[in-house]
Amino acid sequence: MSKQAVRPGFTLIEMLVATVLLAIGVTASLGAISAATNAESEAHRIQTASMLARQKLADLAVQALSGQLSANQQQGTFAPAEPDYHWNENSIATPYTNLFEVTVTVTWGSGNDQHQTAVTTYIQNVDQSTLNSTNQTAPSTSSSGGFNGL
């Protein structure tokens, strides 16, 4: 009987298995990093679109303060600040006097990769004649800005 000397270390098969497992782990990690980056980018685009929609609604609310809001459809772009984003405004008169249902839809992307977000609210058109008559009949008040208690 012959005895073989036992050498410490790993066999070729063990090294191949370890290499394959390492390659699978690295590939999965890179895929997860890529997916996270894409999700963060999409979340940023959605957040930007929502912010732009709120900005457009604020502009329409300012229009309503001067009594200039009317039932109509308009569209445009947010260029030059955000040229990839487009808006579509749809104002619909409600049964209530001077009250409009306003929907602002913001779209971005092109072709099969087009996305959109919509924000709907109600805006009251201010009737300047009513506002002026209210201001003329209301008593005026003044305040010194300090504490006048005690």
Image (cartoon, rainbow, N blue to C red):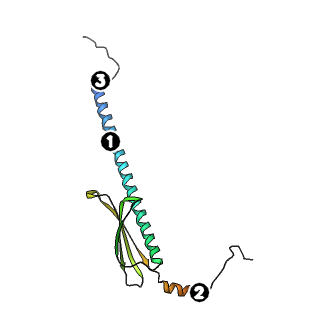
Query: For this view, does 109 lie left or right of residue 59?
Result: left
Q: Position of residue 143 (x, y in %)?
A: 67, 77
Q: Which badge, 3 or 1, comes first in the chain's sequence?
A: 3
- The picture quadrant where one finds residue 111 is bottom left
SS type, badge 3: loop
Q: Which element is circle 2 on? A: loop
List x then y, in percent, for residue 27: 31, 39
Q: Position of residue 61 (x, y in %)?
A: 45, 74
Real-space CA distance between mark 3 and mark 2, rounded to the nearest whole angstrom: 95 Å
Mark 1 lies on a secondary structure that is helix
Do the CB atoms of the residues marked 3 and 1 lie less than 8 Å apart?
no
Above/below status of 129 relative to 63: below
Q: Name which residue lies at 27% across and 26% down.
A: 13
Badge number at residue 28: 1
Q: Earlier in the sequence, mark 2 or mark 1?
A: 1
In the rendered image, which quarter is residue 68 located in?
A: bottom left
Disc 2: which residue: 138
Which amino acid type is marked by label 2? Ala
Query: In the picture, residue 67 is in which quadrant?
Result: bottom left
Q: Position of residue 102 (x, y in %)?
A: 38, 74
Q: Nearer the viewer, residue 117 or 33?
A: 117
Q: Residues within 10 Å of mark 1 (few under 14, many from 20)?
A: few
Look at mark 3 in the image and give the residue it sits on: 11
Category of crowding for the residue at label 3, using alpha-carbon neighbours closer than 10 angstroms: few (below 14), some (14–19), many (at least 20):
few
In this view, the mark in front (3 or 2): 2
Quadrant the N terminus occupies: top left
Q: Amino acid at mark 3?
A: Thr
- Circle 2 residues within 10 Å: few <14, some 14–19, many ≥20: few
Which amino acid does the dot numbered 1 rest on? Ala
Compared with 66, 22 (above or below) is above
* Distance between mark 2 and mark 1 Cα atoms: 70 Å
Measure the C-alpha gap from mark 3 to mark 1: 26 Å
